[in-house]
Image (cartoon, grey):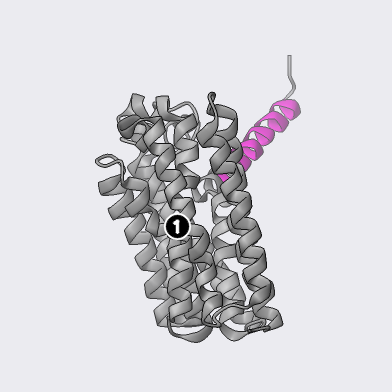
Amino acid sequence: MTTATQRAGLAAQGRSWGVRQRLRDYVTLTKPRIISLLLVTTLAPMIIAVRGWPDSWTVLWTMVGGYLMAGGANAINMYMDRDIDARMPRTALRPIPSGRMSPAHVLGFGVTLASASFVLFALRVNLLSALLALAGLLYYVFIYTGWLKRTSPQNIVIGGAAGAFPPLVGWAAATGQVTLTAAYLFLIVFFWTPPHFWALALVKQKDYGRVGVPMAPNIWGERNTLRQMLMYTLLLIPLTLVPVSYGGLGPIYGMLALALGLWLLRDVVRLVRAVDLTRPAWTLYRNSLLYLALLFVAMAVDGSLGVRW
């Protein structure tokens, strides 16, 4: 038999656990692991744009605003995908399908984060960066999640452009404008997205098929998807080198970009040649995340050194 003191202690522990779980759920809604890569692709363009380290306050507010906007977009995405999340093993434990949060609460949380981000960008950075960050969210929510994700195998190709907005936001935050080099950085992320995400789709195609999401492997078949992945990779590698040709980026970046591109191509070719796709697809998926991060780190190093042809 427990005493009143013991019961009070158990109740306090329960409340403490509940608070920790709620905080974990809020963090889960923002998808921090995905955002960490987005922030890398935001910061590197800021360094390139000013050929060195930007104003520290601008960097801070841009990183905070970027996290809030991306986190808001991810929360709204979970609200919109709550029906299919409940039917896929890898997403069934998210806050809404698990019953820990109501859909309305998650939607409100996402909208609040996005609104705070826009105000922060507009007041502490500049209006152009605020508009570009908001455009990325709207594209992700309405073009990708609301329209293409459930209707077309091109969902990742066209809708994936949402993930390419951070370089534009970073460049605009540092300079107040968008230039040709910023546009090339957008295209680099755009062409990187299909081979990266289709690697995951190859592994999870049964899950996507079960919930009716027309991912490329389910509609085009595995072999055609693999050919498309190889094509996008072969387009991506020379695209990463274009800014070097006109001095937008320097030789240090150029050498690193070529080496990283060949590394990515090796993994894609291994996947294309594989009989059992699961292991090489997982390898490509993980390595492609590292590839993009290292590519933008190479840009930042090159930009900070300021070496040009």
Give the residue displayed 56% in from the left and 76% down from the top. Answer: 244
Q: At which x and y percent is residue 19?
A: 60, 42
Q: Residue under circle 1?
A: 235
Q: At which x and y percent is residue 169?
A: 47, 72
Magenta residues, start to end: 4-23
Q: Amino acid at mark 1?
A: Leu
Give the residue displayed 61% in from the left and 63% down from the top. Answer: 257
Quadrant of residue 28 in the image? top right
Left or right of 295? Residue 156 is left
Which of the two residues, 119 or 260, is positioned nearer the viewer here?
260
Q: At which x and y percent is residue 7?
A: 69, 26
* Residue 194 appears in the figure: no
Q: Outermost residue, top direction?
A: 1
Looking at the rendered image, the quarter that the C terminus falls into is bottom right
SS type, badge 1: helix
Which of the two residues, 109 or 70, is positioned nearer the viewer here?
70
Query: Overall secondary structure of the magenta stretch?
Result: helix
Which of the two residues, 143 or 292, is positioned nearer the viewer here?
292
The residue carrying pointer 1 sits among few (fewer than 14), some (14 to 19) or many (20 or more) residues within 10 Å by Cα, namely some
